[in-house]
Amino acid sequence: MEHPSRVGKYELEQFLGGGMSHVYRAKDTVLGRLVALKILTEAGSADAEAKARFLLEARMASSISHENIISVYDFGEEHGRPYIVMEFLEGESLRDAIRNAHLGDFYARMRIALQVARALDFIHARKIIHRDIKPENIHVDKNAKVKLMDFGIAKSEGVQLTRAGFTLGTPFYMAPEQVLGKPLTPQADVYAWGILLYEVLTGTKPVAGDSIEKIFQSILYEPVNLEPLKALGMPPWVVELIRTTTAKQAADRPESLGIVCGQIERMIDSGSQKPARPPASAPQQHAPPQRPTPQPTTQKPAAPSTGPPVQTRPQQVTPRPAASAGTRNATPALPGFLAKLPSPLRSQGGLMFLAALSVLVAVLGIAGVLWMLKLI
């Protein structure tokens, strides 16, 4: 592969990767700073829609300024090939951080997800939908500072560049409405963020499949399995947050990631007094899911401690059945001759027997009278 050595005032020092566009570490020869330069390939430049999308990304990204979004310094065109100049980031992608177990404890992971949510809430307020949230498009530096990158398929309100019948986005993180090719709202990014949070906390994707068809089937019809989260001891509020953000219907998800940010900030602050002990809080949050397992063998179903169950069980089992049984079996209201009957006949079944016998005797008596009258 042959790479250019210079683009405009930028000297290209190292090829960093890319597909339809190539990314280089470069040096701004005027300002003397390191930058990342992204340039569309010749094949991409020959595709009118790909070129229009690249230029749209350049304009869109250059208009955004947020601490958790990569900064764009410049953009232009060199020999018919558009390019974007961005800040040069040191660190690794969130994908590599997950793979290399560099995410830290529970609170560190939630802070990473919080920064992504803040970045998305910021662009949503400016009528921009990212549409391609995934670990590869999120950068994390050594201080766990997050930068949202790659607005290549982002879409602002009123802009339509997608070919008919062609769905854009990474399959595992696509919302159901995105799979179906429906018009998208910021709720599509909310869904992708929920899937991302699941992966940040568990290290695995909640959506699986060895083909696009199976992945889409899972996205459309199978709810996210929350059991792995519970098994890891995730707090109930986190499990519920993932459940709501990954709801199949966009209307069932949180209205905005701003609301989600507020919730996470409150929960993190409530636990920030003990930053060195996040693992200790996980078992406490996990105690309810763990209790059902020993129930069949220990016969102590809901006992947070040993004292109360021992005292309460005899009170619930012994007195109450005795009192209720005595009330049901007593016959204090039996009148006169019935009270003198043998005890078996004073029961409900005995009384029914006597009643039936009385009716039979009466019937036989009437029949006998009629027979006698007939003889006369």
Image (cartoon, helix red, strand yellow):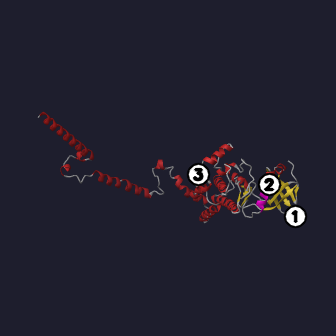
Q: Amino acid at mark 3?
A: Leu
Label located before the other in sequence (2 or 3): 2
**Quarter in which the C terminus is drawn:** top left
- Residue 229 in sight here: yes
Disc 1 to disc 2, how far (Cα)? 28 Å
Rendered location of residue 319, percent (x, y):
34, 55
Q: Which residue is rendered at x = 14% and y = 34% of the image?
A: 374
Kindly tell me whether residue 274 is visible in this rendering: no
What amino acid type should be assigned to the residue bearing mark 1? Val
- The local secondary structure at tag 2 comes to helix
User: Along the polypeptide, which appears first: circle 1 or circle 2?
Assistant: 1
Q: CA distance from mark 3 to mark 1?
A: 53 Å
Say whether disc 3 or disc 1 marks the residue closer to the N-terminus.
1
The image position of residue 318, as x and y in percent, is 35, 53
Q: Nearer the viewer, residue 268 or 330?
A: 330
> Mark 2 is on which residue type?
Ala
Report the disc number at residue 226: 3
Q: Residues within 10 Å of mark 1 (few under 14, many from 20)?
A: few
Residue range corresponding to the magenta coloring: 53-62
> Of the numbered discs in the image, which one, if any, rests on residue 52?
2
Q: Which residue is the site of mark 1?
A: 30
Residue 328 falls left or right of residue 231: left
Q: Position of residue 126 (x, y in %)?
A: 71, 63
Q: Residue at x 58, y 56 (%)?
A: 240
